[in-house]
Image: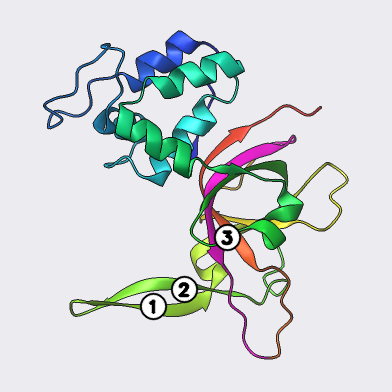
């Protein structure tokens, strides 16, 4: 999970995404006021302008004015601009992920995270891909085997309903205020007879530390 610090100026974001792409993006040119797929992918730290790249762009422009945000989108090459407008990440409140979320879509949500210490609190499972020869199959494992898990609440009172975010295991998030998360909605599985606490989790890709209000 990568921290995104939203750009404070339009010029700063323009320079970041109008970057010429990687060496093999032969038809991309830096500072030509047109952002190609390769340039957006490079800025996002990915190798193709997919939904993750769109997620980066949406989070990177959060602190700009509405006019400046539109200006950034208009810099995208025409087909990329159409794709972004069609697949733009949905902004959603933490308490609505379970009811309004859709598996496989990208979302952005801001809230107060709480690390889940008790691994018996959520008896839920995730599907991970496994290669068997040349065939990809899926196996079910407990979510805690793969991720650090946080509950995210709408405000500092930390009252339910909440949502679940998962990030690669490692150092815990250390922040007293709210955090904006950007990621992909994934389905949670349960064994027969186990209580369904949440329908989905958000596999986080980016985050931004916010100030308390």
- The residue beneath circle 1 is 138
From what the image shows, is residue 111 above or below residue 58? below
Magenta-drawn segment: 175-192
Place residue 24 in its image quadrant.
top left
Which residue shows up at 50% across the image and 27% down it? 60
Q: Sort mark 2 into few (<14), some (14-19) or many (20+) by Cα contacts within 10 Å.
A: some
Query: Cα distance, mark 1 to mark 2?
Result: 6 Å
Mark 1 or mark 2: name the one nearer the start of the chain.
2
Task: Tell me where residue 65 appears, x and y as whole percent.
Answer: 60, 15
What's the mark number on residue 64?
none
Residue at mark 2 to residue at mark 3: CA–CA distance: 16 Å
Q: Foreground mark, 1 or 3? A: 3
First in residue order: circle 2 vs circle 3: 3
Q: How many labels, in total? A: 3
Labels 2 and 3 touching (C-beta < 8 A): no
Is residue 205 positioned above or below 124 on the image?
above
Residue 176 drawn in magenta: yes
Label 1 packing within 10 angstroms: few (<14), some (14-19), many (20+):
few
Residue 116 visible somewhere in the drawing: no
Name the one closer to the observer, 13 or 130: 13
Instruction: Please report contact status of discs 1 and 2: CB closer than 8 Å, yes or no.
Output: yes
Numbered circle sitting on residue 127: 2
């Amino acid at each position: 999970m990568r921290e995104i610090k939203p750009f404070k100026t339009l010029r700063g974001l323009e320079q970041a995404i109008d970057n010429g792409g990687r060496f093999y993006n032969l038809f991309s040119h830096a500072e030509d006021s047109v952002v190609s797929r390769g340039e957006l992918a490079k800025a996002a730290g990915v190798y193709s302008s997919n939904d993750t790249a769109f997620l980066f762009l949406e989070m990177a422009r959060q602190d700009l004015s509405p006019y400046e945000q539109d200006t950034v989108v208009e810099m995208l090459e025409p087909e990329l601009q159409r794709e972004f407008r069609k697949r733009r990440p949905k902004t959603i409140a933490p308490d609505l992920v379970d009811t309004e979320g859709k598996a496989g879509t990208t979302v952005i949500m801001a809230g107060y995270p709480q690390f889940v210490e008790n691994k018996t609190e959520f008896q839920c499972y995730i599907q991970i891909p496994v290669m068997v020869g040349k065939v990809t199959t899926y196996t079910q494992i407990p979510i805690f085997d793969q991720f650090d898990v946080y509950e995210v609440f709408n405000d500092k009172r930390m009252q339910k309903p909440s949502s679940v975010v998962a990030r690669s295991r490692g150092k815990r998030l250390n922040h007293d205020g709210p955090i904006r998360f950007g990621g992909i909605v994934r389905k949670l599985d349960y064994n027969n007879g186990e209580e369904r606490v949440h329908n989905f989790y958000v596999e986080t890709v980016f985050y931004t530390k916010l100030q308390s209000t």
